[in-house]
Image (spheres, rainbow, N blue to C red):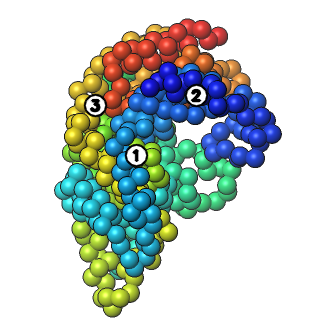
Amino acid sequence: MWPLVLEMIRMDRPHLTREELEPYWMPFTGNRQFKADPRMIVASEGVFLVDDSGRRVLDGLSGLWCCGVGHNRREIAEAVNAQLQTLDYAPAFQFGHPGAFALASRLKAITPVGLDYAFFTNSGSEAVDTALKMARAYWRLRGKSGKTRFIGRARGYHGVNYGGVSVGGIPANVEPFGPVLETALLSSTLLPENAFSRGIPAAGLELAEELIALIARFGADQIAAVIVEPVVGSGGVVPPPLGYLERLRAICDENEILLIFDEVITGLGRCGAMTAAEVFGVVPDIMTLAKQLTNGAIPMGAVMASAPIYEAFMNAGAPQHLLEFNHGYTYSGHPVGCAAALAVLDILEQEALPQRVAKEAMYFEDVLHELKGAPHLRDIRNFGFAGGLQLAPMEGDPTRRPFEVAMRMWHKGFYVRYGGDIIALGLPFIMERNEIDSLVTALGEVLDELD
């Protein structure tokens, strides 16, 4: 198959001109640099992307953390095609279709006990904003309307909608847009003493106690929820210190504060289980899911809520025909998205891919940490099939060196993510050991080549 595909690309896919490139305002991209030196992806298969010259490029980030079961899975394509030929769309408000109820039941079964209700969105950003609105509305229904404040964490990433950037801890995602929701941030758990830790770092549990200080400052009666990624993803792949998440859970319980886990990246396999909550043994009140939900095939996200939260809305005393939660999207629970998601869950379960990640994560850890001592490398972090390399800043421009690494990797035939001072890796769950070796070896070569 591959030789034919590559030949068709060379023959039928001419490079776009600058004029053809110009109208598209690209997201999270240096548009000027890209349009001067485009990197066009035109096909994919398994763990490889294909560019417009027919080169195979090893996908070191699972797309954008979202294609863990591999690209162009026949099972997903067939499920989507069958759904499109049966029911392409159903109104999401006041009407339903079987796929949404089937998917909600599947998600209930694979998320921690107590997260019993699924609300569907179209992305991780929408899932986060939905979770925040859900938390505020819940406390109003409980007669505690003063509980409106949220606590996030430095280096946290919770999408790009206004709620998400408000609770996120990446200043560059907030500063260009002016005032957002009033929030407070816990300190990042990225500590110098944990540099080059393998997996869960030992130091930093005491940082959870900052939540007690914030409660003393604002009052528990003013705080609706704490939101964290169990393992920080886009902010640099930062696993939590030993016992940290458990302590956050205990403090929230003691002070009637909801705990939200943003599992948009960590959910559905990347940490070696269906959820990071399962790995760490900590159950949040609300969990967001998205990226791996449809393997990137169709935009979709979900919010899993506990029974007490759902029941507060259902038991508010309003007539049955009235809306309990004035929130939703035209494409919530889209039939085609649900079909894709159900096919993905089948693959994850039938091929035991979360278990495969758990088994192979130690090999990935060993290979990745062999880079210790490479030029410009300040830290290596890993958990499951996620890894982060923190690079020393280039004089005058701390963001330049990761960009240079990523561009050189692309030209060598490898795709990795760069941002801030980080190179991020998010391996497809099906990646073989020889492919892991080639990816990490190339990273070492590039670091050696850089000034």
**Can see residue 360?**
yes
How crowded pointer 1 is (Cα within 10 Å; few <14, some 14-19, many 20+) is rated as some
How crowded pointer 3 is (Cα within 10 Å; few <14, some 14-19, many 20+) is rated as many
Q: Position of residue 352 (x, y in %)?
A: 22, 36
Q: Residue at x 31, y 52 (%)?
A: 342
Residue that carries the numbered disc 2 in the rendered image = 8
- For this view, does 3 lie left or right of residue 178? left
Mark 2 against mark 1, which lies toward the viewer? 2
Mark 3 against mark 1, which lies toward the viewer? 1
- Give the distance between the C-alpha atoms of the residues marked 2 and 3, in whole angstroms: 34 Å
Which image quadrant: the N terminus?
Answer: top left
Q: Position of residue 271 (x, y in %)?
A: 31, 36
Q: Label 1 sits on what residue type?
A: Ala
Q: Residue at x 68, y 50 (%)?
A: 176
Residue that carries the numbered disc 3 in the rendered image = 357
Q: In which quarter of the image is residue 303?
A: bottom left
Q: Residue 77 has which mark?
A: 1
State if disc 1 and disc 3 touch (CB < 8 Å).
no
Mark 2 against mark 3, which lies toward the viewer? 2
Give the structural element (helix, strand or loop) at label 2: helix
Q: Label 3 sits on what residue type?
A: Val
Dot placed on the residue nearer the N-terminal end, 2 or 3? 2
Check the image and name the residue furthest to the right: 19
Compared to 427, does 313 lie above or below? below
- Give the distance between the C-alpha atoms of the residues marked 3 and 1, in whole angstroms: 24 Å
Q: In which quarter of the image is residue 115?
A: bottom left
Which image quadrant: the C terminus?
Answer: top right
